[in-house]
Image: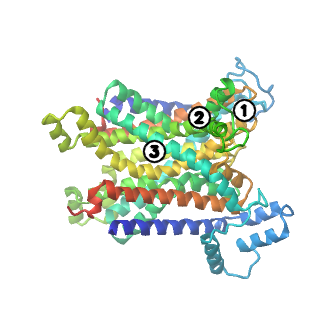
Amino acid sequence: MRYILKRFLALLLTGWVALTANFALPRLMPGNPIQAMFARFQGKINPQAANALEIAFGLKTKQGIIGQYFTYLGHTLTGNFGFSLVFFPEKVTTLIGQALPWTLGLVGFATILSFIIGTAIGALAAWRRGGAFDSVMVPMGVMMGAMPVFWIGLLVVYVFAFKLGWFPIIGSQGGGQGLQSISGFAEVIDHAILPAITLTVVSLGGYIILMRNNMIAVLGEDYVKYARAKGVPSGVVAYRYAARNAILPNLTTFALALGFVVAGAIFVENVFDYPGIGLLLYQAVTGLDYPLMQALFLIIVVGVLLANFIVDLLYVILDPRIRTDGRS
Amino acid sequence: MKTFLHNRRAMTGLGLLVFFAIVAIFSSSIAPYSPTDINFTPMLGFSAKHLLGSTPQGQDIFSQLVYGTRDSLLVGVVTAAIITAIQLVTGVFAGYIGGWIDGLFSAVTNIFLVLPGLVLLIVITSYVSSKGLPEIIAVLAITGWAWGARVLRSQAMSLRDRPYIEAARMSGERRWRIVVAHVVPNMSGILLANFFGAALYAILGEAGLDFLGLGNINEVSWGSMLYWAQSGNALLLGEWAYLLFPGVCILLLGTGFGLLNFAVDEISDPRLRGF
């Protein structure tokens, strides 16, 4: 119980730091980016909205910085993110609501798939350490980790969509019929395959190396040697003794790596023009749309934090040592 | 050292690094033209005069590629050096001395660990008005140090109770001297591995920022080449060379750092070695 409470407090603390950083960053930067934003959107949005924004960013207000901070906290916690400037008069929350499912699907699919495949390859490489499979998979894994995700995306588009024409080049759906009909569903899948594969390939390398090295460490443990010596079938040793214990530390990395996968999604969505959170963030960043950008940053951070918290909870179920706070 | 020379992965990584270092140092003699010269016929194919053809803007692709090496290598090495310096304080020193300083630093590390670094990177760069190399390097360092710091901290903590450290403490050596003279040298393998890992992160991060147009796109770099290739629809024009080669260079330099990271890890932890 103490463990869960500690993790929960860490979650709150990190969340608060992210909230505060979001508030402080534009105000700390030299050259006042907020004023630059207003200069850019002068006359493009109606005066009422501009006024609301100026208050939100503390330009036309008699409030001190502390007062502004609490106003900001209040707005954020009640989900009041204001209007987007690039997509004016759309509300920030509406835009995020539309984009979120696409990214969740993409990131969720790629993370889970790369975790499963990477762990399996890594375990096998460790089991046959020094063998042909191992000596191919290690450099392959390192190379996958060194691939610029947007570049792989562009190459994939060029070869499979442009040259071979197997898949649509960009977008997320055909006629925009969504998931209501079977053909609409097929369109959605058809559009998702290339971006999902790109993201999976780039995330795979890290898991291969991580699992291989963890598994090798576990294979050196006395209980594994003992199991082998007493004649436990090697398949059982590999799976039930070694791999299971080697996967545990991977789970933490799995959760922390989510941040990287989301970042990867920004590039992938940009290359494939896929209408998720990442593309929206790109549009917000290039368009100096700070209200939208701040909200997106928070959504991404909260998502990653929650995923980490869930993994921490899973640990309690998977690792009895944590359940008992280290007492046996 | 001998194990390093006999490690195939280490030597491959080192070879890649040395190759790119030579290209970066002798860029001006290797490249036939100035990378910013736009006086060539646009979209030429491969030829003896233009080894890899020319861009839709009429620049020589090969010359750009050669000069771009400088940018990536510089960002990788300098950022990794800064990150290592941060990690020495927040990881090694704090982990060794323990107490409230360690508590504070590890709380900060844990926060930075969970915050998605590259997303933070993109958000911060969008606020920075001037985007020269120093700004990019600073942002890369701020967002990239946490992971290694945690690894180093646990290593430093495990060294704290070793007999030779204890002996140094008993003989009255100062804390910082113990860290510098006894703890750090015994962590050199893991520090080096971390350095290479940080360089890989920095190279990919910078290329990504350049590609999104958030870096300095007027500077010649592999990332900005990809930005111009993408924004100029190089793919649809069939200019695949403009797209392929900068990425191959990033991949190879990154693989060089990645292999060294892996190999040094392997050498300092012999259990990981295959044969």
Q: Residue drawn at (12%, 36%), measured in percent from left and top?
A: A230
Q: Position of residue A269 (x, y in %)?
A: 64, 44
Instruction: Give the residue at mark 3.
Output: B197
Looking at the rendered structure, whether the residues under marks 3 and 2 are on a common chain is answered as: no
Of B120 and A250, the residue lying toward us:
A250
Q: Give me the chain letter of mark 3.
A: B
**Taking the image as drawn, is residue A148 in sight?**
no
Q: Secondary structure at mark 3?
A: helix
Of A92 and B19, the residue lying toward us:
A92
Q: Residue furthest top?
A: B48
Q: Give me the chain letter of mark 2.
A: A
Q: Residues within 10 Å of mark 1 (few under 14, many from 20)?
A: some
Instruction: Give the residue at mark 2.
Output: A152
The relative height of residue A121 versus residue A8 in the rendered view (above or below) is above
Q: What kind of residue is marked 1? A: Ser
Q: In this rendering, which labeled residue sits more in front, label 3 or label 1?
A: 3
Mark earlier in primary sequence (3, 1): 1
Q: In this rendering, which labeled residue sits more in front, label 2 or label 1?
A: 2
Q: Position of residue B221 (x, y in %)?
A: 65, 39
